[in-house]
Amino acid sequence: DAGITQSPRHKVTETGTPVTLRCHQTENHRYMYWYRQDPGHGLRLIHYSYGVKDTDKGEVSDGYSVSRSKTEDFLLTLESATSSQTSVYFCAISEFQGTNQPQHFGDGTRLSIL
Amino acid sequence: KNEVEQSPQNLTAQEGEFITINCSYSVGISALHWLQQHPGGGIVSLFMLSSGKKKHGRLIATINIQEKHSSLHITASHPRDSAVYICAVIYSGGSNYKLTFGKGTLLTVNP
């Protein structure tokens, strides 16, 4: 299994508070991704990173920011959490970009915003 | 809008049955992925296809590019196959990192 650790695994917080989720990899893969998974929707890309300090927006990036200061860590921040951001968040990594490249997923973070 | 449709949404089978899960998409793609998500959430990549057919153990994935359709088959199903199966595509002409996901098919295999 790819060495991907998401932390925390579960979090409950209140509306308006800042939240940071961490994705840590031990594979030295260049590409990292943050997705959210909600009932009735497929996984949706929030942000991705194609290298240290290189990030770009996905399809549902509003309300989220990311940072990648080291190859192994990709942080997702909700500056002021809202109830609509209650979701399960998955981090994924891939060694290369390309149509035949698999993405390896972390175990997810269940975030509840009350 | 580029969409990925999976059917059925839910599938219940008896142990030993042959299972088929379908995935259709709206425009041309570069590749298609099948993923498995077990209860408890972990997601594992099963197959990547751009043409033809792939087999791994009891799992077989096929793709028909002309018909914009893929199927995932499970032979001799087992309760441990119970999971959500997710189809995802990379659209031609788009960024080659970006996966568009279906909503998943929940498979339950009863003993």
Image: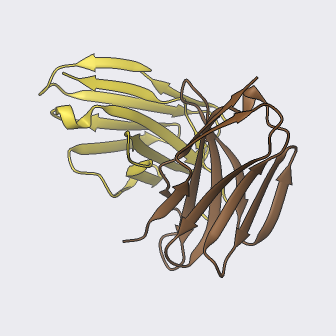
Q: Write the residue at 84% across / 44% down.
A: B75
Task: Give x and y (percent) for residue A81.
Answer: 18, 32
Colour that chain B carries in the picture? brown
Image: A47 above or below B3:
above
Regarding residue A112, the answer to whether it shows in the image is yes
Given residues B71 and B41, the one toward you in this image is B71
Instruction: Give the quadrant of residue B57.
Output: top right
Q: How many marks?
A: 0
Using residue A31 as the reference point, say whether residue B76 is left or right of it. right
Q: Write the residue at 52% across / 62% down.
A: B97
Instruction: Give the quadrant of residue A39.
Output: top left
Image: A53 above or below B15:
below
Colour that chain A carries in the picture? yellow
Given residues A35 and A52, the one toward you in this image is A35
Given residues B5 and A26, the one toward you in this image is B5
Task: Give x and y (percent) for residue B52.
Answer: 79, 71
Given residues B37 and B16, the one toward you in this image is B16
Using residue B52 as the reference point, say whether residue B50 is left or right of it. left
Looking at the rendering, in which quadrant would you find the N terminus of chain A? top right
Task: Give x and y (percent) for residue B62.
Answer: 75, 64
Colour scheme employed for the rendering of this structure:
by chain
Q: Write the residue at 56% across / 66% down.
A: B24
Regarding residue A99, the answer to whether it shows in the image is no
Q: Write the residue at 64% across / 41% down.
A: B36
Task: Give x and y (percent) for residue A51.
Answer: 48, 53
Looking at the rendering, in which quadrant would you find the C terminus of chain A? top left
Using residue B35 as the reference point, say whether residue B90 is left or right of it. left
